[in-house]
Amino acid sequence: MSESSPARLPAHTCLRNAYDRGDLAFIIVAGAMVFFMVPGLAFLYSGLSRRKNALSLIWAVAASNGVVVFQWYFWGYSLAFSTTATNGFIGNLSHIGLRNVLAGPSPGSPLIPDILYSFFQMEFACVTAAILMGGLAERGRVLPGMVFIFLWMTLVYCPLACWIWSVNGWAFKWGVMDFAGGGPVEIGSGVGGLAFSWVLGRRGERQLINFRPHNVGIVYLGTAMLWFGWIGFNGGSSFGANIRGIVAIWNTMIAGAMAGLVWCALDFRYERRWSMVGLCSGSIAGLVAATPSSGYIHPWGSIVTGILAGAICNFATKVKFLIRIDDALDLFAEHAVGGIVGLIMNAFFASTTIIALDDVNIGVEAGWVDHNWKALYKQVAYVAATCAYTFVVTALLAKGVDMIPGLKLRASPEGEILGIDETDIGEFASDYIELRREVHDQFGTTSATGKFDFVAGGDRHGVNDNDLGSPHEQPKLNPISEKPEQHTNGNGTAHT
């Protein structure tokens, strides 16, 4: 090659340089923020549960993250976003193992490459699975839960993501508006959690009496981590450092704030006290409602969305009592109902002005504020299809896994009393013995035998008179290990 001849670059070099480095950096950071929601959910769930089950929920959330990362790499991304599948329902395996997923424009936006888009969407999948793991609360075994979540991601989440986000998805082509996952993430996890809880069954009635979160401070910490991550969750769904993303962030903040205040005010009328759990619950409901709507509506619309989400989701917590499904962490009321509120609000408030702020989606049909009257029935039909498909397939999957030998989803009645931390994990989030309300109770009480019958304080193992009958039927608890002592019969066999 002569010195005067220009060097010829590989064809893909120009493609790599076509992306704005600011857009790339923004989505990388936004994806990392979405990952931060996973430990946020772990903290939230552990704080809301009894102490004896706190670590099992942290473990389930953390382990599900690992399962989904592999599933998404292996075939999840391909099933959700392969562009060569045209059935409108689910993708094919053209990108299995991230094959040919590199520098080409992503199926979601020409602003970022396929490899970055796959990472960002993977974090959405991880958060969805983490939310769904709340269905295990207080009575579900964690190993069968991991098998279930792999299958659920494949047969429920991937089709839902394909419907609305794939270029060939039926909902996408029909013009349904779902910005950051009201269907796949929120309805998927909320209705899926309801179906999973239904198959798992109710906790023992004694475990439902006088139940309260064991660490409300951790509940707020988890909520704050979620809120931080949600800024990346919704803001990053503009797929670039653009004004639409900034509007989405504003809408996220407004909806979360308004819903938190409304929920807390509604709870005040019952207790005449300002509930921290209520404030956190309402904030999450507003953030959920902002998920499908934040990139479509003006900030004033998010005030209405937040108020409605806080009120409707608060009342929706009563549904589980009507249908007698033990949705312990209110996945349906918070996530499914919040997602539905946001999706329906799009029909009224979505604006072409907001949509066009990413400089990509120009001239897209919006909602009633732009006189697009058919938006409402499309949004309602999408909600109905997503709810029905999620509930039916989730219930069938959970029942199928439960029937596999060795993968029974439900812990034993004894394990439920002792706590899933004891039966499945062997470690504890807070491994200590709490003093009883009366100081002298820490030294035990003298029984008829003249020995001390030590009783562990708190409810880490939940062993008390109501659970195990009369004092003569209760196992003796060692004040150090808090585990039943082993006694030996005359023939040498051990019994509790």
Image: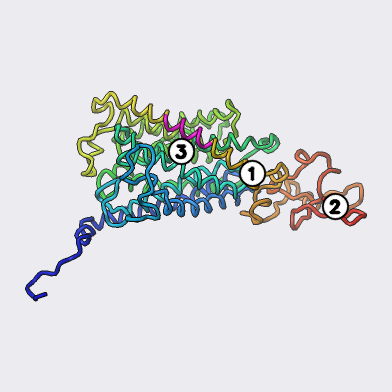
If you read the primary sequence from the N terminus, does the residue marked by circle 3 or circle 2 appear first? 3
Residue under label 2, please give it.
452
Label 3 Cα neighbours within 10 Å, binned few <14 / some 14-19 / many ≥20: many
Asked if residue 204 lies left or right of residue 234, the reply is right
| Structural crowding at the residue carrying mark 1, measured as other residues with C-alpha within 10 Å and reported as few (<14), some (14–19) or many (≥20) | many
Q: Secondary structure at mark 2?
A: strand
Q: CA distance from mark 2 to mark 1?
A: 38 Å
Identify the mark nearer the N-term, 3 or 1.
3
Location of mark 3 (residue): 188
Q: Magenta span has 381? A: no
Q: Secondary structure at mark 1?
A: loop
Sequence-earlier tag: 2 or 1: 1
Crowd tier of the residue under label 2, counting other residues whose Cα lies within 10 Å: few below 14, some 14–19, many 20 or above: few
Residue at left offset 30%, top offset 32%: 174
Q: Which residues are magenta?
A: 385-394
**Which of the two residues, 424 or 428, is positioned nearer the viewer here?**
424
* Residue 256 visible here: no
- Quarter assignment of residue 262: top left
Look at the picture and state if 293 lies above or below 103.
Answer: above
Q: Could you tell me how far apart the alpha carbons at marks 3 and 2 are, in whole angstroms?
A: 52 Å
